[in-house]
Amino acid sequence: MNKKIIIANLKLNGNLKYIKKYIKKLNKYINSKIYKIFIAPPILYLYFSNLIINNKNIKLVSQNIDKNFSGSYTGEISGKMLKDINTKYVIIGHSERKKYHKENNKTILKKIIATKKSNLIPIICIGENIEEYNKKKSKNICKKQIQYIIKNNNIKILKNTIIAYEPIWAIGTGKNADINHINKIHKYIIKYISSINKNIIKKIKIIYGGSINDKNICNIITNKYVDGLLIGKSSWKIKNFTKLLNIINNLK
Ligand code: PGA
């Protein structure tokens, strides 16, 4: 069985002392046969995290990337810089970046291209808002977000990527999508991409994110269409995150 991907998205939280303690604890959770750990600290701490991670089994994830490689772009960070400090993955199109930084399909595609050109792996977030969910448009919204990438680039750009299905209404709200809904959407994404290219889909992982906690994790992670989880709030306290890892470790 392929190992499930478990990503801790620390968002804008922590300080040096916290990151040090966090990774020290995480270093003890690397030998699972069931999951691989990915950590997305605030970008400022990626370099330091890399220095104290003592095992290749913990992968570094950046929460952002710039679409440019160098030049007059004050405040930005390039893919090459991320690669330079051993980052492997980049979260792109997170709903918080869409909301607070007005990222749209066009920016997201440019960031995916920059990520790929830097030999990093994009974690592409897609998902519907509450109105779209209520109107039963979830499938169509997810399709459109993927379709934009394919139409304006090429299906091949999706090879070796991770797609994170993150319904916006489930992020940080305490209301996770139920497993039937997740199952339906993940299957639909597979069907849609396969209808365009049967081989590429084998090289894509589809993970879920949105209000994962110790009560719902078992049901979601054991689903065969869920390749992993993107976890926000429940990963911020190392005690809570390791509780989730222990739950997964104890799965039969
Ligand atoms: P949450 O965040 O687990 O706090 O809902 C998930 C995410 O933002 O990816």
Image (cartoon, rainbow, N blue to C red):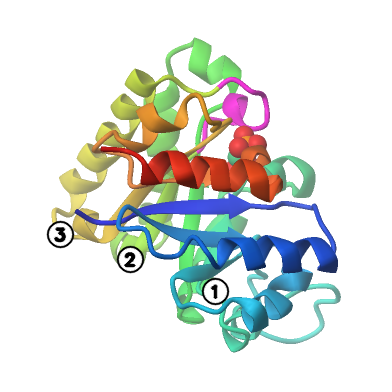
**97 on left or right of 33:** right
- State which tag comes first along the sequence, 3 or 1: 1
Residue 164 against residue 117 in the figure, above or below:
above
Measure how far apart labels 2 and 3 are at the Cα level.
11 Å
Residue 249 against residue 121 in the figure, above or below:
above
Question: What is the quadrant of residue 16 in the picture?
Answer: bottom right
Magenta residue span: 166-175
Measure how far apart labels 3 and 1 are at the Cα level.
23 Å
Q: Residue at x 58, y 30 (%)?
A: 211
- The kind of residue tagged 3 is Asn
Residue 135, image x, y percentages: 48, 11
The residue that disc 1 covers is 114
Question: What is the quadrant of residue 222 in the picture?
Answer: top left
Q: Residue at x 82, y 83 (%)?
A: 72
What main secondary structure does the magenta stretch of the protein show?
loop
Residue 51, image x, y percentages: 66, 83
Q: Nearer the viewer, residue 17 or 202?
A: 17
